[in-house]
Amino acid sequence: MIFYFTGTGNSLAAAQTIARATGDMLADIGASYKRKDFDFTLEQGEQLGFVFPTYYWTTPAIVDTFVKLARFRTGNREAFAPGYCFAVVSCGRFVGNAARVFETRLLASQGINLDASFSVRSVGNCTFLYAPAQGERREQLLANAELEARRVAERVRQRERVHAEHRNPVGVLLSAAFERDEKPCPTASFHTLPTCIHCGRCAELCPTNTITLIEGTPRWAEMGCTRCLACLHRCPTNSIQYGKRTETRGRYANPVLAERKGA
């Protein structure tokens, strides 16, 4: 089984590519977290995978919490031990030490060793820091990401035991600066423009239930956000902003989301 977390679709695209090659089922970490459903039944020795993005050069807070709360059991309710366990980290530029951080957290919380780790670079979505790639540059990044995901899929299918994510000194330094046990994500900068149509899509998409609707207008709780930016990028009228800079920057969603009902 492959567990994935995605805000704007990059990790979902990679997870689907790998699952097609390996025959693994997919499980949505965001949906599980939203429902507070952390019980999973697997076959003893089944392959176990995790695909998730890099946030601030480390693991997303929601992934950290999921690893702590998930209960992996067999049909006989025995403790589960995978035959092979891997992680794939998607990123916009620097993957940092995210896979190594995840490895440590997985072992501490679940007693599971990570046999392999990989990375896939795609279109970055951190709009409050930079504008997402557009036009030909975006298409090239998406094409390259698909090719890289296919290469990773083959290595996973062969059950390679290797840590092969694309780390570099800058990313590793940034990871050291931002990795914390607790990763609060301030929400005060979120706001809506008058173009909001009060559709409630943002609240539906929010995996942490941080958004509530007050008279149809979204409001963000102070705590709980994992800063996936799904609300911002997938708002149908581009009404949701994070600070001032996002008003003049484009939005991004991986094309794989268009294939999902209601995306």
Image (spheres, helix red, strand yellow):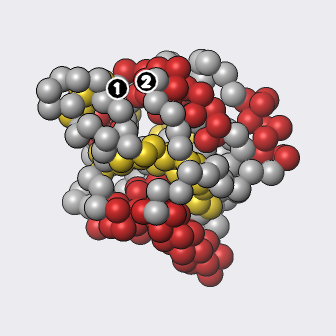
Image label count: 2
Disc ID at residue 110 = 2
Q: What element carries label 2?
A: helix
Disc 1 residue type? Ala
CB within 8 Å, label 2 to label 1? yes
**Which percent across, then down, holds residue 99?**
61, 41
Vertical placement of residue 62 versus 257, above or below: above
Q: In which quarter of the image is residue 213?
A: top left
Q: In which quarter of the image is residue 15?
A: bottom left
Q: In this orientation, does residue 31 appear?
A: yes
Vertical placement of residue 101 versus 116, above or below: above
**Which percent across, then down, holds residue 24?**
30, 55
Q: Judge left or right: residue 122 versus residue 5.
A: right
What distance separates the C-alpha of mark 2 from that of mark 1?
8 Å
Residue in the foreground of this view, choosing between 194 and 176:
176
**Which percent across, then down, holds residue 185?**
58, 27
Q: Nearer the viewer, mark 2 or mark 1?
A: 2
At label 2, counting other C-alpha atoms closer than 10 Å, the crowd grade (few under 14, some 14-19, many 20 or more) is some
At label 1, counting other C-alpha atoms closer than 10 Å, the crowd grade (few under 14, some 14-19, many 20 or more) is some
Residue located beneath label 1 in the image? 70
Residue in the foreground of this view, choosing between 134 and 159:
159
Residue in the foreground of this view, choosing between 256 and 118:
118
Q: Which residue is drawn at 61% across and 52% down?
A: 162
Q: Judge left or right: residue 153 versus residue 122.
A: left
